[in-house]
Image: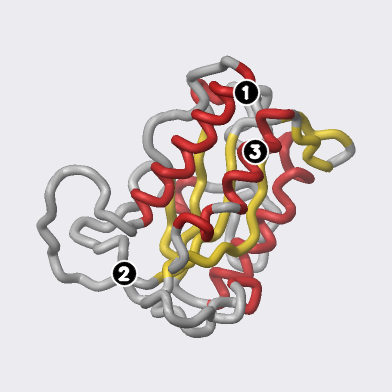
């Protein structure tokens, strides 16, 4: 059993009880609202499609390079989005996505801890049609997953890339951002204990 991930222990095993990986969407929260999000997207059946870990370093294969390139290009398609750190792992992707309040001015890079971002989730219940709202986190992730799948299908004639849905955590303060930042960057070094690793015990 790995140690739980908690403040002050950023490189330990990700603990779903702490990070609410199974159900962390807030009912009625408008995900197009300005905010910072820690996102995890897992491959279909947790297959290691994107490469392998060697000497605690992620070695991307062709699929992994496509997943990485598509992630980096998200702001080209969503100008109001700013990216923080991210990592493509053998069978999942972690990343920080920042949705700005408007598209007028950059917040100076998510690496600067997103100083202009609002952190608190609104509590108003918002009714909307089924499907992700345009410009919402769900729309951004859906577009990313589709882009990766289409490129891999076109260039390598492969399908069934992603699991349905994704996991996200609303980052409410700089302490959380710091911990998540370190967790993402240290992920390859702790692949042996990662809950997404099919060989993990």
The label shown at residue 194 is 3
The secondary element bearing badge 1 is classed as helix
Q: Answer with mark 2 or mark 3, whichever residue precedes in sequence.
A: 2
| Residue 61 visible in image | yes
Residue drawn at 79 percent across, 34 percent down: 53
Left or right: 35 with respect to 194?
A: left
Figure quadrant of the N terminus: top right
Q: CA distance from mark 2 to mark 3?
A: 31 Å
* Count of marks, rendered view: 3
- Please tell me whether residue 54 is drawn above or below residue 126 in the rendered image: above
Q: Are marks 2 and 1 in contact (CB under 8 Å)?
A: no
- Specify few, some or many for label 1: CA neighbours under 10 Å numbering under 14, 14-19, or 20 or more: few
Label 2 or label 1, whichever lies nearer to me, is 1
Say which residue label 2 marks.
33
Label 1 or label 3, whichever lies nearer to me, is 1
Near-viewer residue (52 or 134): 134
The label shown at residue 155 is 1
Label 2 or label 3, whichever lies nearer to me, is 2
Q: CA distance from mark 1 to mark 3?
A: 30 Å
Figure quadrant of the C terminus: top right
The secondary element bearing badge 2 is classed as loop
Residue drawn at 72 percent across, 55 percent down: 185
Residue drawn at 10 percent across, 57 percent down: 127
The secondary element bearing badge 3 is classed as loop
Q: Position of residue 125 (x, y in %)?
A: 13, 64
Q: Quadrant of residue 146?
A: top left
Q: Answer with mark 2 or mark 1, whichever residue precedes in sequence.
A: 2
Residue drawn at 80 percent across, 36 percent down: 59
């Amino acid at each position: 059993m790995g140690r739980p991930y908690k403040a002050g222990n950023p490189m330990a095993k990700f603990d779903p009880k702490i990070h609410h990986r199974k159900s962390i969407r807030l009912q009625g929260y408008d995900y197009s609202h300005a905010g910072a999000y820690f996102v995890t997207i897992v491959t279909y059946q947790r297959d290691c499609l994107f490469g392998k870990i060697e000497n605690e370093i992620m070695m991307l294969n062709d699929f992994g390079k496509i997943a990485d390139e598509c992630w980096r290009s998200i702001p080209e398609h969503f100008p109001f989005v700013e990216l923080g750190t991210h990592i493509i792992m053998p069978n999942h992707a972690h990343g920080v996505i920042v949705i700005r309040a408007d598209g007028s001015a950059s917040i100076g890079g998510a690496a600067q801890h997103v100083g202009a971002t609002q952190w608190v989730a609104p509590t108003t219940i918002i009714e909307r049609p089924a499907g992700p709202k345009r410009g919402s986190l769900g729309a951004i992730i859906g577009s990313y997953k589709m882009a990766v799948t289409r490129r891999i299908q076109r260039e390598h004639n492969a399908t069934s890339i992603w699991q349905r849905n994704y996991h996200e955590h609303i980052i409410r303060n700089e302490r959380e951002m710091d911990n998540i930042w370190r967790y993402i960057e240290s992920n390859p070094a702790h692949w042996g204990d990662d809950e997404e690793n099919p060989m993990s015990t």
